[in-house]
Image (cartoon, grey):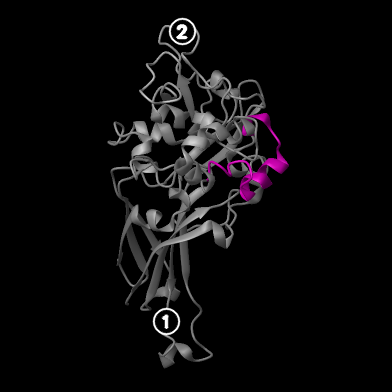
């Protein structure tokens, strides 16, 4: 199935509203995780009364420096998010991108950590232990899986982000988020959270095999490596673009002539796709129509046909990681990462 530009009218309600997965959501903030809450209810055992990020940094300088260079720090000021927020300035968006109310701090220390007032204070520590919600992955889940809006309550379940569900369905379900996203460095967990902007880490997460299956067809076998959720995950319009293109050797006189055959190109984008439908109340709701991203634990195959113009010609294949802002748009150069490429002879 070749990637053909879909009519933009089908995305009229989504193109702006879904940019970066921020805007068809309910205006009211999602309920904050009750950090440290007891199983039987009642008041949480943890709080941050009288504390702020600067207080944390005074003792945890190395961790604070990592955080300052992280996407969590720039969660609200990141340019793609800022563009989307300017179009739809919703409280829902701020609840995850600046949960402590300080846009310049984004997702700060206090967004994930609470001091457990009921736990014994370690010798020499100025405060009781900190807890990351009810567990490390629970702290992540609050902002990395959520529905479009309150249509979930009416049975129309469509998730803006579905990372937690993807992880729960994988064989890595017993491995916490921090195991991969916060590797141990110098005796502590790194707070850089840099994987989605780390080209090397993205390349290491994908294996690709490519073969010709006829004069003009190329089959690519893709497998995510050590990834405990769909690849890519997160924002709505992230995807893997698989492409093949004729790549005639310029030293070949037959193709260097002015009458050389035009290049043949075929592409396919592996991503989530959505549309809007009328719900039971008559209101428009968002539904997911397909998802062909790479699933954890198994390989996927993509077969592309170059047609008549591709017969008997060398081809180059490429897999790119895309961070598009709206559906069906080509992302900017700085939002593309070439993961793997190769050349196949006729």
The C terminus lies in which quarter of the figure? bottom left
x and y percentages locating residue 15 in the rendered image: 65, 45
Is 119 situated above or below 290? Answer: above
Does 284 sit left or right of 51 as displayed?
right
Give the extent of the magenta segment.
71-93
What's the CA distance linking mark 2 and mark 1?
A: 68 Å
Report the number of discs. Answer: 2
Q: Looking at this view, is 241 or 60 the one in front?
A: 60
Is 339 situated above or below 98? Answer: below
The N terminus lies in which quarter of the figure? bottom left
Does 131 sit left or right of 207 as displayed?
right
Residue 52 falls inside the magenta stretch? no
Q: Looking at this view, is 79 or 247 the one in front?
A: 79
Q: Looking at this view, is 298 or 72 the one in front?
A: 72
Neighbor class of circle 2 (other Cα within 10 Å; few <14, some 14-19, many 20+) is few
Q: Which residue is denoted by mark 2 in the rendering? A: 41
Question: Residue placed at 37% from the left, 16% from the top?
Answer: 120
Residue 163 occupies which quadrant of the picture? top left
Question: Residue placed at 54% from the left, 56% from the top?
Answer: 335
Question: Residue placed at 44% from the left, 71% from the top?
Answer: 245
Q: Are marks 2 and 1 in contact (CB under 8 Å)?
A: no
SS of the residue under disc 1: loop
x and y percentages locating residue 269 in the rendered image: 47, 54
Q: Which residue is denoted by mark 1 in the rendering? A: 248
Q: Looking at this view, is 324 or 263 the one in front?
A: 324
Does 108 sit left or right of 87 as displayed?
left
């Amino acid at each position: 199935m070749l990637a053909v530009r879909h009519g933009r009218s089908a995305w009229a309600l989504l193109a702006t509203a879904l940019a970066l997965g921020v805007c068809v959501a309910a205006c009211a903030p999602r309920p904050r995780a009750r950090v440290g809450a007891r199983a039987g209810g009642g008041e949480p055992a943890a709080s941050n009364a009288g504390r702020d990020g600067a207080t944390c940094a005074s003792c945890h300088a190395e961790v604070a420096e990592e955080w300052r260079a992280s996407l969590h720090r720039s969660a609200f000021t990141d340019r793609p998010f800022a563009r989307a927020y300017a179009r739809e300035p919703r409280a829902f968006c701020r609840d995850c991108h600046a949960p402590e109310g300080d846009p310049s701090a984004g997702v700060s220390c206090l967004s994930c950590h609470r001091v457990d007032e009921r736990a014994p204070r370690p010798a020499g520590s100025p405060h009781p232990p900190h807890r990351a919600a009810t567990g490390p992955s629970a702290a992540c889940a609050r902002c990395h899986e959520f529905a479009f809006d309150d249509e979930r309550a009416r049975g129309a379940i469509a998730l803006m982000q579905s990372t937690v569900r993807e992880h729960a369905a994988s064989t890595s379900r017993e491995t916490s988020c921090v195991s991969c996203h916060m590797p141990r460095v110098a005796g502590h967990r790194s707070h850089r959270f840099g994987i989605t902007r780390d080209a090397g880490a993205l390349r290491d997460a994908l294996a690709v095999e490519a073969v010709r299956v006829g004069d003009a067809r190329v089959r690519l076998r893709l497998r995510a490596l050590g990834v405990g959720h769909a690849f890519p995950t997160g924002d709505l319009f992230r995807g893997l673009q698989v492409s093949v293109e004729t790549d005639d050797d310029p030293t070949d006189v037959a193709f260097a002539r002015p009458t050389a055959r035009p290049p043949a190109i075929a592409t396919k984008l592996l991503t989530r796709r959505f549309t809007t439908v009328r719900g039971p109340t008559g209101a428009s709701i968002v539904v997911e129509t397909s998802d062909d991203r790479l699933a954890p634990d198994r390989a996927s195959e993509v077969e592309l046909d170059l047609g008549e113009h591709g017969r008997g010609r060398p081809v180059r294949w490429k897999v790119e990681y895309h961070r598009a802002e709206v559906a069906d748009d080509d992302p900017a150069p700085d939002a593309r990462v070439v993961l793997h490429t190769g050349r196949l002879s006729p």
